[in-house]
Image (tube, helix red, strand yellow):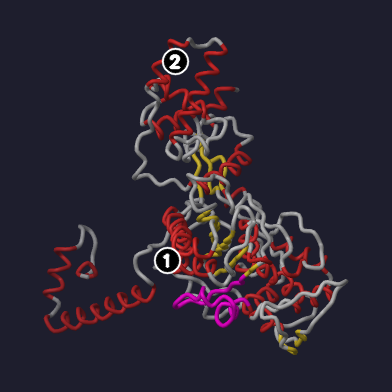
Amino acid sequence: ILKLYFDRAYMGGGAFGVEAASQFYFGKSIRDVTLAEAAMLAGLFKAPTRYAPHVNLPAARARANEVLDNMVEAGFLTEGQVYAARKHPAKAVSQADYYSPDFFLDWAYDEVLRLAQSYDQRVLVVKTTVDTNLQKYADQSVQTILRQEGQARHVKQAAMVSMDTDGAVRAIVGGRDYGESQFNRATQSVRQPGSSFKPFVYLTALMNGYTPESVVTDRPINIGGWTPRNYSGGYVGRITLTNALVRSINTIPVQLAQAIGRGKIVETARKAGLTSDIVISRSLPLGAADLTVMEMTGAYATFASGGLKATPYGVLEIRDSAGNVLYNHWRDAPKREQVLPRDKVEQLNYILSQVVERGTGRRAILEGLKACGKTGTTNGYRNAWFMGFTGKYVTGVWFGNDDYSSTARVTGGSLPAMTWHRYNAYAHQGIEVPDVPGVPGSGTGTDVLAATSDGEDGAGTAVGPRLLSVPTQKLLRAIGDDFDKLLTVASAETGGTRLAAAAQTERPAGQGGAVSAR
């Protein structure tokens, strides 16, 4: 049993088992480590992320000394034997050129444990959903905005989750610096989402007789002494549901909740994918619920899928050491279900596209694509969110402080929307994006990647190129088409001799046609 644990335990840095950890940290087999290195590895079992030497070498060495002290105290070693290990502590090999998506791996590890608990194999090979290109840029996006704006805006932390519309998690940012704090603010921290919760209210209203053009009245209201106010401080009177959400008016969702029932709103949120306990209160329609960035992003992915349930996942495949497939997501995961009416979700998505186009989420606008999203800001500017999606990716961003102190008026439409835009402008380069359900013309065309990747055969997820924008690709295709026409004309004028010669020179044996001349 102990050997099985040593072979499977998570050791930080994406390494599972003592052999993988030894190779990662020291560049050698576990059979060749010194006593100092063995003590450092043993110290990782207690808290692998905290004591990982590539993250915090002083802490790793201090922990290794504790291990040595315990072994001396227990009688396994003498002071003389550990003297050299203390005098010459272990030093991890340089990881300067190695990138480890640590926040993602910490989260995915729990999923691996859940899926692999019934397997007897000592060695498992796991294929995950992480896209290291997107993960790196997600980290950079958060760090850049915090570095540029953090001090002036009194905000020290941020979190981000990005996934495909089916729930495949591509990137997780759990904080500004994994080395300083391994607490994952994207998956472990529950914060109030503010107005980014309102889509659940509006969708419930649409499911109960309201339409996007239904007219409601923005006016002062009083519920048991509680008088919710708008961010602007004033009231606009009669307004459609669409414009009420676009302008993020507070009195309307409160009135809608009174009319349709708060319990129905919670039911809708649950169907969409929220899993945390939700207390039914009069301020619930304004986002008075404690939720994680991960579950909010998953719920918005259900919107992006037209009401088809999107459960976040990080494991694509698990194989044993012989290459046999033990788990395949497409084969073994529960099939997705239509949990919300597609026509109503499409109506909501159109409204959310207007939030970005002409509402509080304008800083998230993407060139050449229509995005859908919603801002969220809580009392005292303690939490600021932007939740948004295209037909390809769903991304949630949160800014705030660990001690719940107020920021300097950071709203969801400011730093979170800016970070969302920065990341997604990169993420959507060079890929085809399908339309969002309910928002015609919001994408770039048919998603050919979705049709050729993540298939039933478990081949994994194809990652699109990130070098050329869609307009640039179209221009190159047009140039290629023009070049074909020129070749055709030249062939007609010269009897095809030059093209035939070129084709004969360029093409591999056994292949015909002048296509190789391109």
Numbered disc 2: secondary structure: helix
Residue 303 visible within the image: yes
Q: Is residue 92 above or below residue 277?
A: above
Q: Which residue is disc 1 drawn over?
A: 426
Q: Quadrant of the N terminus?
A: top right
Tell me where residue 499 sits by quadrant: bottom left
Determine if the magenta segment contains residue 360.
Answer: yes
Mark number for residue 87? none
Q: x, y (%) of residue 509?
A: 20, 57
Q: What's the residue type where badge 2 is placed?
A: Val
| Point 65% across, 68% down: residue | 196
Q: Is residue 479 magenta?
A: no
- The answer to whether residue 498 is left or right of residue 453 is left
State the residue in front, 164 or 256: 256
Is residue 206 visible to us here? no
Furthest-bottom residue in view?
238
What residue does disc 2 label? 82
Residue placed at 37% from the left, 71% from the top?
469
Query: Horizontal and vertical percent for residue 23?
Result: 40, 32
User: 261 and 331: which one is in front?
Assistant: 261
The residue sitting at 54% across, 52% down in the picture is: 174
Write down the quadrant of residue 20 in the picture. Answer: top left
Q: Residues within 10 Å of mark 2 (few under 14, many from 20)?
A: some
Range drawn in magenta: 352-375
The image shows residue 60 at horizontal and vertical percentages of 47, 32
